[in-house]
Image: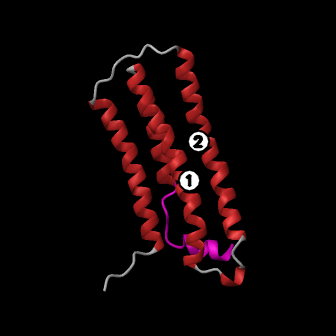
Amino acid sequence: MTQQPSPLVIAQIVTGSIAFSVVVLIVLAHVLTGMDADLPELVLWLLSALAGLLYIVSFVLPPRILRAGLDSLPRDERSPQSVFSAWFPSYIMALALREAPAVIGFVLTFLSLDTSYVIVFGVVSLFLILKEWPREGLFQSLVLR
């Protein structure tokens, strides 16, 4: 009989997968050759601003969703498994919002032939994703919250 992986292992697998996808975007942008789309500078600035806005939203929206999920759980019925169910959607949203600027940087690199976009957004995304690496005791601390 196969044992189910713990919520912590599941969260670490998802985090590692998202972080790896950012690394793949950075490597692909350096290996593949793009075509200069000759975009106006304004478009590049607007897409860069969108990437920055996504970083900000990734710090604001997921904690609110987590708080709402935890508030819906009665304190005396909280367990690591029930807390994981409330925490996981907000965590996935935070990871996706932090990965999206790397994708924007990847696209901008191909549109402008300037790899600095994928490097800057990719490194920032990778840092923010790995900063949230799930650690031992995470769910227990949320049970006590």
Towards the viewer: 60 or 119 = 60
Image point 69% across, 75% down: which residue? 73
At 48% from the left edge and 59% from the top edge, which residue is drawn? 133
Q: Is residue 120 left or right of residue 48?
A: left
Residue 96: x and y, percent?
A: 51, 49
Image x and y of residue 99, in percent: 48, 45
Q: Residues within 10 Å of mark 2 (few under 14, many from 20)?
A: many
What residue would you read off at disc 1?
93
**In the image, is residue 100 above or below residue 76?**
above
Is residue 76 magenta-colored?
Answer: no
**Mark 1: amino acid:** Met
The earlier-in-sequence mark between 2 and 1 is 2
Stretch in magenta: 132-145
Q: Is residue 30 above or below residue 56?
A: above
Q: Number of labelled discs? A: 2
Note whether residue 130 is visible: yes
Label 2 sits on residue: 55
Which amino acid type corresponds to the residue marked 2 in the rendered image?
Answer: Tyr
Q: How is the image coloured?
A: secondary structure
